[in-house]
Image (spheres, grey):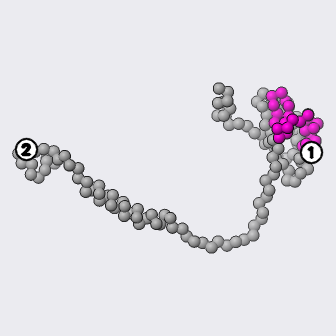
C-alpha cells in the first residue's frame, strides 16, 4: 500500500507529512521565469519620430441649449425667451456666426409635439443646420420616477 512508510513493519500507519519538494521546485522555476521576463515587460524602444506640419484642429463650435418646458415656455441657455418671434431673431443671429453653433434641443416629456415642430421649423427657416435632441438615459429616468 502507498500509505505506509518504508519501515512500517507490523504496524502500518498513514504518513502524516506532506512532501513539499515538488511545490518548492515549481515555485523556484516560476521565480526564475519571472526574473528573466520582468525586464522585458518594462523595456521601451527609443524612436526619433519625424515631425511634419499639420493642419490646425478645427475649433469646436459653440452649443446652444434650447429648452422647452411642459407648458411650452422657451429657454435659450437657461434664459427665458419671449416667444417664437424673439426665438427666430436669435436663430438668425446664431446662423450668421461662423462656425455655426450647434443647437441642442431639450424638451419636457409632457411638451406638445406642435410646439417642438414650431421650434424646429423656425430653426430651419433661420438656416440652423446642426440640430440635436438631448435625452436622459432610460435608467436615470426610471429611477427618477420612483
Q: Nearer the viewer, mark 1 or mark 2?
A: 2
Which of these two is toward me, 10 or 126? 10
75 left or right, relative to 138:
right
What is the number of the mark on residue 102?
none
Q: Position of residue 58 (x, y in %)?
A: 79, 58
Decide if residue 95 is on the left or right side of residue 43.
Answer: right
Mark found first going from the N terminus, 1 or 2 = 2
Tell me if residue 23 comes above or below residue 78 in the rendering.
Answer: below
- Rendering coords of residue 133 (x, y %): 77, 40
Farthest residue in the front direction?
Answer: 79
Above-or-below relation of 114 to 62:
above
Q: Is residue 116 magenta?
A: no
Quick one: SS at disc 1? helix
Say which residue appears at 45% left-offset and 63% top-offset. Answer: 38
Which mark, by number, is residue 92? 1
Name the residue nearer the viewer: 66 or 114: 66
**Which span is picked out in magenta?**
66-93
Q: Could you tell me which secondary element the residue under label 2 belongs to?
A: loop
Quadrant (top left, top right, bottom left, bottom right) of the C terminus: top right
Give the residue at mark 2.
11
Which of 3 and 31 lies nearest the eye of the viewer?
31
Give me the residue at 46% from left, 66% from top: 39
Q: Residue at x 78, y 27 (%)?
A: 110
Residue 37 locus on image (x, y percent): 43, 64
User: Badge 1: few (under 14), some or many (20 or more) residues near its Cα, within 10 Å?
Assistant: some
Q: Is residue 35 visible?
A: yes
Amino acid at each position: 500500500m502507498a500509505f505506509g512508510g518504508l519501515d512500517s513493519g507490523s504496524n502500518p500507519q498513514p504518513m502524516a507529512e506532506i512532501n513539499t519538494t515538488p511545490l518548492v521546485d515549481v515555485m523556484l522555476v516560476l521565480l526564475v521565469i519571472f526574473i528573466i521576463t520582468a525586464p522585458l515587460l518594462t523595456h521601451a524602444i527609443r524612436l526619433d519620430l519625424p515631425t511634419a506640419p499639420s493642419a490646425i484642429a478645427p475649433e469646436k463650435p459653440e452649443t446652444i441649449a434650447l429648452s422647452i418646458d411642459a407648458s411650452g415656455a422657451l429657454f435659450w441657455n437657461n434664459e427665458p425667451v419671449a416667444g417664437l418671434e424673439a426665438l427666430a431673431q436669435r436663430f438668425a443671429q446664431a446662423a450668421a456666426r461662423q462656425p455655426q453653433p450647434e443647437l441642442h434641443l431639450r424638451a419636457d416629456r409632457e411638451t406638445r409635439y406642435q410646439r417642438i415642430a414650431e421650434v424646429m421649423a423656425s430653426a430651419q427657416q433661420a438656416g440652423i443646420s446642426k440640430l440635436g435632441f438631448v435625452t436622459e438615459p432610460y435608467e436615470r429616468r426610471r429611477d427618477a420616477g420612483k
